[in-house]
Image (tube, grey):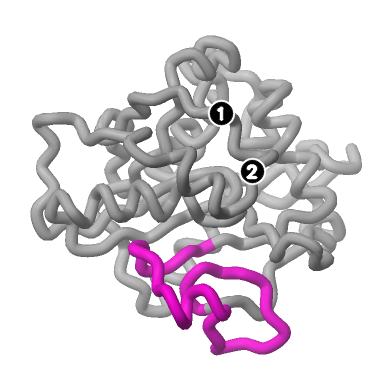
Amino acid sequence: MRCQPRYDGAVYIWLKNKQSCLLCGETTDTPQPICTPCESELPWLGDQCSICALPLPMAGLRCGQCATQPPAFERVLAPWAYDFPIDSLIARFKHQAKWPLGRLMGELLAQSLQHHFNEGLEPPDALVPVPLANRRLRQRGFNQASMLARWLSATLKIPCEEQLLRRVLDTPAQQALDARARRRNLRQAFAITPDAVLANRHLALVDDVLTTGATAQALARLLLDAGVARVDVYCLARTPKPGEPA
């Protein structure tokens, strides 16, 4: 398995017959390095908004925000709620460069997406990772969204277009901001590569977590205004409403 961004050596053999679960350390014979008990105990996202995947008490509903102000993107697909241990796994992948954890979550996300495709969901023409500002990219050393998009591309056989979007403004970090502040924070923050071919295409944005959806909304609106026909969002996890339990 080659899981570092630009490293061609094998970190470990991803498809070997017996490997250790990355969560509990027990031996597992599943295709991915996670045992069946640990996989079953992940915070799988249940009933959710049919557009933005916000956790809801019943299936088949739209959340209040999507009902009154539908977003520019068509649909969010996320396998998990942002709860333990997924929140910890994402943080370790993103901030501690634990790439095998990211690879594992990317493989499970690919399985979830393939299930949706088999059930009739239209696959996108290309996967587009959410870009990082250059300063943050230098600090972190990698863009976790780009890594996820590459892994999804290899598994799902969907092209990955990493250079289609650029972050042209290094805005403050989003985590401490409310939804309105996030929207203000992202105005004019992104740009499309000048030679990008976009007319009538179906694209899927790839990111790690969807919180308020402000970043996805800004990028989807930018792409639609440039001629894209449809934008979906693929991510690992969806957060609940602020103040609500995960």
Local secondary structure at mark 2: loop
> Which residue is at 26% across, 48% downward?
222
* Residue density around tag 1, few if under 14, some if 14–19, many if 20 or more, within 10 Å: few
* Looking at the image, residue 46 lies above or below residue 165: below
Given residues 166 and 28, the one toward you in this image is 166
- Along the line of sight, the residue nearer the viewer: 56 or 12: 56
Q: Which mark is residue 197?
A: none
Q: How far, Cα to Cα, is label 1 from label 2?
A: 9 Å
Element assignment for label 1: loop
Q: How many numbered markers are drawn?
A: 2
Can residue 231 be spotted in the picture? yes
Q: Residue at x 76, y 46 (%)?
A: 87
Please state if 185 lies on the left or on the right of 57 as rendered.
left
Query: Which residue carries the number 2 mark?
Result: 177
> Which residue is labeled 1 in the image?
172
Residue 60 lies, in percent from the top left, at 55, 89
